[in-house]
Image (spheres, coloured by chain):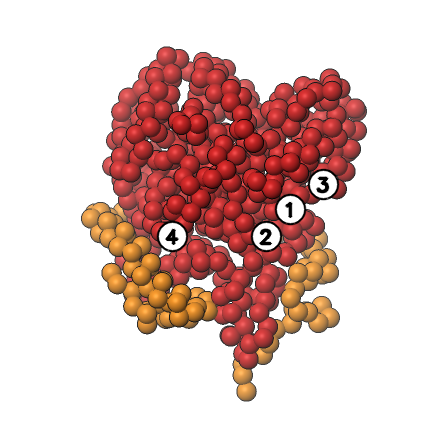
Chain colours: A orange, B red
Amino acid sequence: MKISRKEVLHIALLARVGLTDEEVDRLSEQLSNILENFEVLKQVDTTNVPPTAQSIDLRNVVSDDVIAPSLPLDDVLSNAPQKEADFFKVRAVLEE
Amino acid sequence: MVSNPNKLTIHEAHELLKTKQLSSVELTKACLERIRQVEPQVKAIVTVTEELALKQAEQADKLLAAGKASPLTGIPALIKDNMCTRGVKTTCSSKMLENFVPPYDATVIEKLNENGMVMVGKANMDEFAMGSSTENSALFTTHNPWDLSRVPGGSSGGSAAAVAAGEALYALGSDTGGSIRQPAGFCSVSGLKPTYGRVSRYGLVAFASSLDQIGPLTRDVTDCALVMNAIAGYDSRDSTSAPQSVPDYTKCLTGDIKGLRLGVPKEYFVTGMQPEVSSAINAAIKTLEGLGAKLEEVSLPSTKYALAVYYIIAPSEASANLARYDGVKYGFSYQQGSTMWENMEKTRQFGFGPEVKRRIMLGTYALSAGYYDAYYVKAQKVRTLIRREFDAVFEKFDALVTPTSPTLPFKIGEKAADPVSMYLSDVCTLPINIAGVPAMSIPAGFVNNLPVGMQLIAKPFAEETILKIAHAYEQAAGWVGRRKPEI
């Protein structure tokens, strides 16, 4: 399975990871090599085998509806790169 | 005055603290002094919390004087830097979180604090726990105290190296595909990855949520049991934590393993394994037989698929978990772009290192339209087969014995350029996380003065079986404390 530069750029867009030209070249080669190692799974017959998402025997865990104190606002915002009043500050999402 | 108290085990130090032959402040100062002495070479610690440690030690001495001490009270510990510590930087050894100060404690930190922990610092790791050598740390590489030109293993390499070098009496690590056990093996310490769900993951920076588990790295097996007593148990804040009650893990350390049935899976002794490693493990197997255990070869044929399954599932989960690093709420934030999207892409471009980006890309690819069934769902189905094989084997056997890693600790730089060869160093440990069963690495001697680790695996929630066998072997083999790193 060969991953082209174009595919690398498409995945990078989905993941919102900026890449230099050099990184695109390197990832195209490295991802292709890694995917080659996944080919082995094609040999496995998984007809009628259910997928396992996690290994513990718990289903639909819900917490009790109990009111508990939240973190103080100052603490929540203490690592914010940009803030204004009691809010995280972000750039406009919709451009004009 | 006890000499070099920083090199004691937890249970030895506890006896001395209880009988007033040693104070926690003295013990803590010895660790801090050792940190000053060896850190320039070992580089295991990202943040040393000297002031906090001395304050906690004074507090612990009061508890000890009042007779209110638990076995961990006043004992200096190091915490892997992916567990949130209120008011103390938690970097994940990443540029992304270089200045992140958590506003809350992880559950394991709360539990250790309730037990009177003295935290001397936060341990270096591969960035976001992705790696097997600490070379992926964006801050610096940790060196193996047994040979400074070699890696300590990873991703919990700082935790393992510091315990081996006498900088702390124990450490916490996390293990997604071998990140506690492989460094424990490389540094000749004991490291336990508990059953998935046994220890709360609340406050552990998420890498692959269905595989991650926190566990102890200690100088001996008894210490491992003592730390498990403190950190295991249900937590309402982690919906995957197990409701099962927690036993006293020291009770199983009887030394008696007569008649236990141990399987030796032949698939764990194949391609790429250094012959010295398999001879060391074979010698350990002889010791276990000498103790009355019944050993028999077994087969886990799906083992050969574990690497592929792991490197689809873990990066897929990672790509989703790491989507949160967008430069808005916390962490590194690029702000010079002309649009919101440019800022987000550059935040992730400059904030993440090469391995993290590689895994985000790999996971995004495996989850993307057109490939989801072929990669992600296929891997989840093979995961079912791997788990079924373990379940079947544990019908007949109490535990399995394997090498922890196929190689001795490798040279710094030796595998850094080739991701696939680095991934292969976890080939004996990955299947365990895929199945969600518990496993431990304990010292099984030395080859050319380099440590070899033996891995013990048991069925879900059978940590006691593992600890019992590990303890019996440790007493019979006598590796612990026989040698000390020259540093």
Give the chain of mark 4.
Answer: B
B396 in relation to B320, above or below = above
Task: Identify the residue shown where x is 55% and y is 76%.
Answer: B337
Task: Identify the residue shown where x is 50% and y is 29%.
Answer: B189
Secondary structure of residue under mark 3: helix
Q: Nearer the viewer, mark 2 or mark 3?
A: 3
- Distance of label 4 from label 1 (alpha carbons): 28 Å
Q: Is residue B133 left or right of residue B116?
A: left
Q: Position of residue B242 (x, y in %)?
A: 51, 39
Looking at the image, tell me whether mark 2 or mark 4 is earlier in sequence order.
Answer: 2
- Distance of label 3 from label 1 (alpha carbons): 9 Å
Task: Identify the residue shown where x is 54% and y is 25%.
Answer: B484
- Distance of label 2 from label 4 (alpha carbons): 24 Å
Secondary structure of residue under mark 4: loop
* The C terminus of chain B, quarter of image: top right
Q: Position of residue B79 (x, y in %)?
A: 60, 41
Q: Which residue is mark 4?
A: B417
Q: Position of residue B388 (x, y in %)?
A: 31, 38
Looking at the image, tell me whether mark 2 or mark 3 is earlier in sequence order.
Answer: 3
Looking at the image, tell me whether mark 4 or mark 1 is earlier in sequence order.
Answer: 1
Q: Amino acid at mark 4?
A: Ala
- Tell me the number on the disc at residue B91: 2
Give the chain of mark 2.
Answer: B
- Tell me the number on the disc at residue B50: 3
Q: Few, some or many C-alpha atoms within 10 Å of disc 2 (few <14, some 14-19, many ≥20)?
A: many
